[in-house]
Image (tube, grey):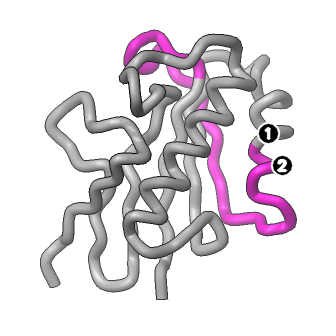
Amino acid sequence: MEPQVIRSKGAPAAIGPYSQATQVGGFVFCSGQIPLDPKTMQVVEGGVEEQTRQVLENLTHVLQAAGCGLGDVAKTTIFLTDMADFKAVNTIYGEVFGDFRPARATVAVAGLPLGVLVEIECVAHCG
């Protein structure tokens, strides 16, 4: 099976030589989303809470373009520039995912594109 490129107008266009997501069989591999407003391609105003909400909204749109949703996510990886933001990000993540709890890793990084505070990638299985 060849990977199928997934594109969503509801999420920001890729800012480099990559796709928003690819689908192989029933698996969807979403590239890391950063808190860009897809209409302006600018980083959303506010702190890590607003950025996290935008990132998860962007991921939701990419997943929808592939025919699935957050309930199909098998694994996420969260990248933070400051682990002091873990609690705030975790709270919003929990609100958005609700009772569903995919596997997850959270990693501290030295920096992220455009100076954002958070980036999240995921793998989903869309049956």
Q: Position of residue 36 (x, y in %)?
A: 46, 26
Q: Is residue 14 visible?
A: yes
Q: Nearer the viewer, residue 63 or 93?
A: 63
Q: Position of residue 22 (x, y in %)?
A: 28, 63
In this picture, is 113 found above or below 93? above
In this picture, is 55 found above or below 114? below
Question: What's the distance in space between the residues labelled 2 and 1, CA to CA?
Answer: 5 Å
Q: Tell me the residue at 41%/33% (across/down).
A: 38
Q: Nearer the viewer, residue 104 or 51?
A: 51
Amino acid at dot 2: Glu
Q: Is residue 50 left or right of residue 114?
A: right
Q: Which residues are magenta?
A: 93-117
In this picture, is 37 found above or below 113? below
Q: Position of residue 75 (x, y in %)?
A: 58, 62
Q: Is residue 110 visible?
A: no
The part of the image, by quadrant, that contains residue 101 is bottom right
Mark 2 secondary-structure assignment: helix
Q: Which residue, given by chain and number where applicable, does mark 2 sit on? A: 95
- Residue 103 magenta-drawn? yes
- Residue 19 magenta-drawn? no
Q: Tell me the residue at 54%/41% (across/down).
A: 120
Q: Tell me the residue at 47%/80% (across/down).
A: 126
Disc assigned to residue 92? 1
Q: Tell me the residue at 31%/49% (across/down).
A: 20
